[in-house]
Amino acid sequence: MSKKKKPPQNAGQMGPGPGGGNMMMMGQKAKDFNGTLKRLLSYLKPRRNQLIAVFFAAILSTIFTIVGPKIMGNAITELFEGAYGKFSGVPGAAIDFDKIGQILLLLAGLYVLSSLFSYIQQYIMSSVAQDTVFDLREDVNQKLEKLPLKFFDGRSNGDTLSRMTNDIDTIGSTLQQSLTQFITSIITIVGIIIMMLSISPILTLISIVSLPVSIFAIGPILKRSQKHFADQQRTLGELNGHIEEMYTGHQIVKAFGHEKKSGAQFDVVNEKLYDAGTKAQFISGIIMPMMFFIGNLSYVLISVVGGILVTQRAISIGDIQAFITYSKQFTQPITQTANIANIIQSTVAAAERVFELLDEEEEMKENTSVSLNRAVGTVTFEQVDFGYEENLLIQNMNINVLPGQTVAIVGPTGAGKTTMINLLMRFYELNGGKIKIDDLDTRDMSRSDLRKNFGMVLQDTWLFNGTIKDNIAYGKNGATDEEIFEAARTAHADHFIRTLPDSYDTILNEEASNISQGQKQLLTIARAVLADPPIMILDEATSSVDTRTEVFIQKAMNRLMEGRTSFVIAHRLSTIKDADLILVMDQGQVIEQGTHSELIEKDGFYADLYNSQFTEKVAG
């Protein structure tokens, strides 16, 4: 597993610092609901004209729909009066089918127009939603590029991915569906109230009384659901983090027999998600039947009072039919508004997680007062201090490396070898002191200028889903096929590549598991060869290849390091005997430095380390 992958047994429970994590244990509810909502709405500002168009389309669509029952009531009144007069023996009384036909034709036209404007509304809003989500993802992606390495070392990959996918998808779904429903519901409520008032103020009062009753009933429910929706989003991110770790590290899990423990951890997190989701959905699910119950009480009361008014000729039968339709429609937008309010709770909880990511502390801003095109290769550490937390790991480190020198860094695990490389690449910022390239402070140049002068071959290989040719070409923009082939030959990778069925066009899967670990390392070495940087970093680059291949790689490395400043982290000391300078590190300090022969003569830490390895080899 790579450095970013956390050990399965620590999923979601890592401590702070490099290699540990802090699984975004956010609060039970949105810390700043209003502020988060306002910030989310700010993403809609660039599309205010489209939203205005959506608003007017919603108004027209809703108006044509609302007028429908009133017109239908007129048709019913016309039919009832004609039939009543005819059967009552009123002279000349008859049903005017022509007039009824005209009314129904007008009604059909209104419904067609309503559907047309509804389509326009949905079409524009889908564009607004997708554009907004696009901007959010773009901001998150750009943010991730600016975050320091310590952020990724301290967070679960699955939780970060959940914020980029699940949480942003929740926001997009709300914008595309719920926002238009919310606009339509508000307009519908206002329009229906106007139409009901035009029919009967008394019946309208009965209908409107149900509104505050509904709000009073669902208010506490909405307040409680917010907490559970926040829990649901948090535990979903935690579950994704666990699954991602178990999937990418499934070989390690199986090798150490942790399947049951992993399954038990999954069950615990899944149970938490089940509890949070069940509570959130149950509490929000109470809203609908409660609204229906209050609406039905209002409906019964309107029917009774309306029937009395019809018998008193205070209202026509068509109008009472239209009013009953309006009263049923009146509760629907209120219910939708209540449900949307609930959805907004979930959306704001998701948006807050996204904004927390966007608000993470970025890498120190670059000072580009100097530029570095291609370095000569002088590297200097001047009184460098560094620590991941308050305790310093490296103190007062002073190193001077000349151009073209090969510097080997050795020492026990945890001595600070990889940390030194991370500082050299400016993955972490110094606590004190300076690192200079060609007498230029690395903090006075852009990170891109600094890093393009380095080539890295790490113990943990990284290859992406694509062809072998594309993976090697990753080291240099615009590389030609011949340059790629030559780099592969230098790295002794050309032979095995050409034995594959599709040669350089062989597609590697996402984990590059269709080639061996040693072959992966050869490809990363070929990539570094192609980059042709003035400074090379080799972090135990030959650790994953067999002894015979190691001989070839060592020869290729010697050619690669000719004329270049090279930093080699090695555990097998026999591979760095020819280094120009060997730095012996222990507990963040360079305790010895010199050539192999000089250090052996000192008979110190390095000599003990070297002799112990040599003795083990002889004994083996």
Image: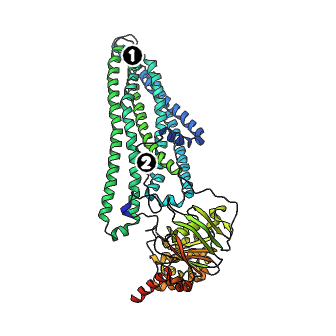
**Toward which corner of the image does residue 367 lie, by quadrant?**
bottom right
Q: Nearer the viewer, residue 96 or 530?
A: 530
Residue at 56%, 52% in the rendered image: 138
**Depicted 424 relative to depicted 174: above or below:** below
Q: Residue 313, how many percent across, how many down?
A: 38, 12
In the image, taking residue 540 as reference, residue 92 lies left or right, namely: left
Cβ atoms under marks 2 and 1 closer than 8 Å: no
Amino acid type of the residue tagged 2 in the rendering: Met
Amino acid type of the residue tagged 1 in the rendering: Glu
Q: Nearer the viewer, mark 2 or mark 1?
A: 2
Q: Residue 446, how many percent across, how many down?
A: 65, 62
Q: Disc 1 on helix, strand or loop? A: helix
Q: Which residue lies under the disc numbered 2?
A: 26
Q: Nearer the viewer, residue 135 or 226?
A: 226
Residue 65 seen anywhere in this rendered image of the structure:
no
Q: CA distance from mark 2 to mark 1?
A: 66 Å
Residue lying at the far right in this picture: please name it. 370
Residue lying at the far bottom in this picture: please name it. 618
Q: Earlier in the sequence, mark 2 or mark 1?
A: 2
Q: Quadrant of the N terminus?
A: bottom left
Q: Nearer the viewer, residue 571 or 132?
A: 571
Q: Which residue lies under the disc numbered 1?
A: 81
Q: Nearer the viewer, residue 330 or 326?
A: 330
Residue at 43%, 34% in the rendered image: 337
